[in-house]
């Protein structure tokens, strides 16, 4: 499907972590999209299982190695599974103060979500902190919303800020990235949650990429944090997109529900009827799916952690993120 553009998923829910980090290479430029990775601090009232920590350690290294190859690093928004902070945290982000972020952003051109327009209060604060810390390692940090950047015969186009889920989402806005080389295109649409917003769906359909990586509806939050009507709307928009896009890489929030494939069945049916593909990032990369977060309770039952690990889980909330878990 793609010859001039090489797309390499680095970390994602189908790899066992929260992320949509992706390396994109063309003959002209190498881009690292959304170089962040996280674990859910609590799921089923349980801290991450040792297998989840083992996975984030391995994928953190994969992202750092990819950063060595990239000239450009993007930030679609300022959630920590989409950019790397500079503080120490061994529970959620697996970051060493200063050093982890430096490995990613040093001497890079960072094309990032505008920190002053279409941004909510919490992300504005995180953007300010990034600019004061990790951003200082970068060659330059530039707002990318609605802009197109050219590198030889490659264009990198950013959307306007679109909602992080439904219109008027309390979670703010994100920017989507489209990489074009010759007559090929790859689009990265993180955290649009379907998309739930009709205008976001219109932008994606108008772009008509050959390959699309998209964050699907958060089924696991249905009924208490997200209205079921919005989930149905997100799935309906996703179905319409898969009917026009040859390859859809479905990722992120949607895969945190153990029953995601059944709930997304209309999507697979629509893609099959049009001769298109819907795959996870792991499947796209030729790897097996590892849905660790949705299986956390099962992991604790099947692979009981060591006594030392269980002792670590009993540390105070203020201390636990500053102590590496014994894995």
Image (cartoon, grey):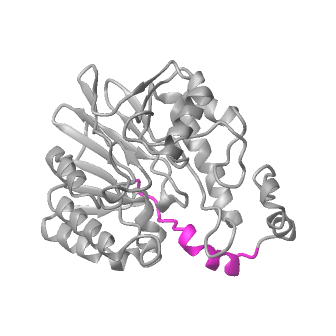
Image x and y of residue 24, in percent: 38, 37
Which quadrant is home to the C terminus? bottom right
On screen, residue 17 versus residue 225, left or right, reads right
Is 125 rendered above or below residue 143? below
On screen, residue 25 versus residue 203, left or right, reads right
| Residue occupying the point 55% across, 39% down | 125
Is 122 rendered above or below residue 248? above
| Residue occupying the point 41% across, 57% down | 286
On screen, residue 271 versus residue 324, left or right, reads left
Image x and y of residue 306, in percent: 82, 70
Is 108 rendered above or below residue 91? above
> Could you say which quadrant of the image residue 31 lies in?
top left
> Could you say which quadrant of the image residue 74 lies in?
top left
Image x and y of residue 146, in percent: 27, 33
Instruction: Tell whether position 182 is magenta.
Output: no
**What is the magenta range?**
285-304
């Amino acid at each position: 499907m793609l010859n001039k553009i090489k797309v390499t998923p680095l970390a994602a829910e189908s790899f066992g972590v929260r992320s949509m980090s992706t390396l994109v290479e063309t003959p002209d430029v190498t881009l690292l999209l959304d170089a962040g990775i996280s674990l859910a601090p609590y799921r089923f009232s349980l801290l991450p299982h040792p297998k989840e920590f083992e996975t984030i350690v391995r994928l953190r290294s994969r992202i750092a190695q990819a950063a060595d190859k990239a000239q450009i690093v993007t930030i679609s928004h300022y959630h920590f599974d989409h950019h790397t902070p500079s503080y120490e945290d061994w529970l959620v982000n697996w970051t060493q103060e200063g050093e982890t972020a430096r490995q990613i952003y040093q001497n890079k051109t960072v094309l990032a979500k505008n920190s002053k327009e279409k941004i909510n209060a919490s992300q504005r604060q995180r953007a300010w902190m990034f600019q004061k810390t990790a951003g200082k390692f970068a060659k330059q940090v530039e707002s990318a919303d609605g802009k197109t950047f050219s590198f030889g015969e490659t264009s990198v186009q950013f959307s306007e800020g679109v909602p992080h889920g439904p219109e008027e989402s309390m979670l703010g806005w994100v920017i989507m990235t489209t990489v074009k080389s010759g007559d090929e295109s790859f689009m990265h649409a993180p955290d649009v949650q379907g998309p739930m917003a009709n205008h976001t769906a219109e932008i994606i359909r108008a772009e008509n990429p050959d390959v699309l990586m998209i964050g699907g509806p958060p089924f696991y939050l249905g009924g208490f944090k997200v209205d079921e009507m919005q989930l149905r709307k997100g799935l309906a928009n996703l179905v319409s997109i898969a009917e026009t896009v040859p390859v859809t890489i479905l990722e992120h929030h949607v895969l945190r529900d153990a029953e995601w494939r059944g709930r997304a069945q209309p999507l697979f049916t629509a893609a099959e009827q049009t001769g298109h593909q819907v795959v996870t990032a792991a499947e796209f990369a030729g790897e097996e799916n590892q849905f660790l977060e949705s299986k956390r309770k099962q992991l604790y039952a099947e692979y009981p952690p060591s006594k030392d690990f269980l002792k670590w889980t009993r540390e105070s909330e203020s201390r636990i993120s500053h102590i590496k878990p014994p894995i």
